[in-house]
Amino acid sequence: MSTDQRKRELEEKRAKLEKMRQEKMLKNTPTTPMTPGFASIPAMTLTTTREDADPDKILKEVGILQTASLPATSPSVSPGSAGGASASASSSQQKRRPPSSIALQICQQPTATISVPPKELVTYSKEVQTIESGDKDPAASPIQHEHLQWDDEFPQPTAGERNQLVYVSDEDTMSFDENTKPSIGMSLASVAKLERTRSLKQQNKQFSLQGQSSLVKQELTNEEREQIQKSEQFQDFFSRSARIIERSLWESPQAFDLFKDYSGRESDEQNEKMDVGEIIKFDREFFDERWTRHRIVTCIDTSTYHPELVLASYSQNDESTHESDGVVLIWNTKFKSKPTPEYVFNCQSWVTSCVFSKFHPNILLGGTYSGQIVVWDTRTNKRTPVQRTALSASSHTHPVYCLQVIGTQNANNLISISNEGKMCSWNIEMMTQPQESMDLAYRTKPVAATRMVFPGVEVNNFVIGSEEGQAYSGSRHGNKAGIQDSYEGHFGPITGLSCHNVNGSVDFSSLFLTSSFDWSVKLWSLKESKPLNSFEVNSDYVTDVRWSPVHPSVFLTCDITGRFDIWNLNHDSELPLLSTTLDGNVALNKCLWSHNGQQIILGDDQGKLRLYDVNEFLTNPKQDDFNKLSSTLQEFKRNTLDAFDDNHPTSVPTTTTAATTSATSVSHNS
Amino acid sequence: MTQAEVDDTLKRILEHKGVTGYLIINNDGIPIRTTLDASLTQQYAALVRSLTDKARSSVREIDPTNELVFFRMRTRKHEILIAPDKEYILVVLQSTDVQ
């Protein structure tokens, strides 16, 4: 180991180092391993930082002595490379002084920049987390927006979109090619909006074109159409929508006037007022060509839930045999010009009496000629009854002439009475058999009932009119269940029966009126077996009589000549207040007051229902009307007593005839 | 309602003063029954369906418990009555010039 050799080695190694350093600079490695470790050094892969850190150490390891080193370092050289590490460690501590003598190369190291893109924060707005239905254009979001603009560069996501993209690019002649891309960047927002709307328009066109094409493809064959129209869903939908459409169609003529004719509104309102002198005013009539022609109106009822609905039942149509025998229609009085019924219901035998169920808003009940009682439901779409009673001996076998729902919301019953004298009580939910049935007989003679009324809110006591002309009162339960009293006076079947039902200062609930084929209408009290008064102004069968529900002394009668009378007992107890005969050869069969007493409904034998508005003074009773009525009743009593005194006071029939003759003579006098 | 009654009612609607035609479409916009000509039918079918959908969704958005029951558009020349339902839509066109 001569010094020359040593020096030569030194030179070589130094040159190598230089070369290494330069290579390193050229290569410009970006990643710098932070932990070079000593293992790299023997392999001669020196990192730049490592080199900067301690060139002395490296030199020491290869056994090169630093000339500027202190003499203390000289012994470190001798051990050589093996002990160079520890020696160099100690020496490097001393060698912190910048070794300016060594050609340290301070090179500029380009800092490697690593750019990590910011973490994309994906947020959802809390309200809408799904795409709006029907709003399917991809042009809405800005990200895909770019796709639309530079369709050439970015890959097409879906086939559908591609079509649209193609569509857009074909027509889009504005600045959307790649050359003008950079310039767009500035005005991207406004352009984007334009593009969006345009693309929306094109999209809609595309959609409609697509839609049309799809329609063409999917157009239904005639068989399919027929199939759909026969389907139940369609029927359901149609009955609902057609009703709404018809109502609105019939309302719209007036609505048009509102739009066009400024004075139209005033002329409409003028028609509403009624003259004070007029007692009644014709409102409208209900008639259906198909369903009510050649049928007699057999029963009328108004609904408590919807006072504008009128229910009418009709007899069978003798003219046409293919129509069903039993027809029941619901008419709506609210829509003035709609001429068609709201609902039509059928059943097998003609309906003799019908009633709305007071406690179920959608149920109607009908009693038929065959003795069956049928239940219709307006909720279903069927025209046939949803429930029917059985035709058995336990229920009726004769025509059911009268139905009434009594009771309260929770405990209600349907009472029916038929011509054979049987009275049955039913639970509306279960109509397979009656809850109880009772044979009505008066002194072992069955009562052929034609009319039945439960006065007021009574559930036990009732009044019945029979075919023989007597009226009876009875009760359903109790000690004396069955008929109790009889009221004799009429000579013909009783056709109408009405109990007084006005709440006022004086209670007249024991009064009832009867009308009969014997041309008379009689006023009775429940406590007396003789009539209080008899009204004999009719010259033919009187078919119905009804007390007004709001005025204590007003009632309505109708007869078979088409004449109907409104009586006011406070005004005149001998003659009616108003007497009108309808034109034509009509016979009135039924009459009814509306619930508020402001309208009267008359049903005739030709299937027509006529509605009249009643003047206000007949619907608003004054306080003294009640007192007046009491005094009138006293007068009646006095009249009968006088008649009683005048004649022989023994036999009942003579007194009754005397009473009637005296009544008529009195009427003649006045 | 039987088919005959459906026909009757439609005929009655058609005979009403001013009515120029009707159209029944299902929810896909396919006309089931119409008195308009083919092109008009297609147009109305597509447009009415989208319009009804939009109206329905608007009503629902304002109040989710509410729903569209009837839709009546009065334009200068016509009044369009639309009765939408779950599966079908009945559209009736009534001309306003009659009055």
Image: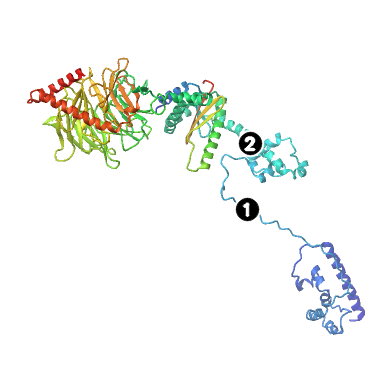
Of the pair B20 and A94, the residue shown nearer to us? B20
Q: Residue at x 56, y 24 (%)?
A: B77
Q: Which residue is mark 1?
A: A122
Q: Mark 2: which secondary structure?
A: helix
- N-terminal label among 1 and 2: 1
Specify whether A11 is left or right of A404.
right
Write down the chain letter for disc 2: A
Q: Residue furthest top?
A: A584
Q: Position of residue A77 (x, y in %)?
A: 84, 82
Q: Is residue A88 above or below residue A434?
A: below
Label 2 sits on what residue type?
Gln
Tell me the quadrant of the picture where the N terminus of chain A can be found.
bottom right
Q: Position of residue A482 (x, y in %)?
A: 16, 35
* Residue A467: mark: none
Q: Which residue is mark 2?
A: A203
Q: Is residue A652 above or below residue B57?
A: above
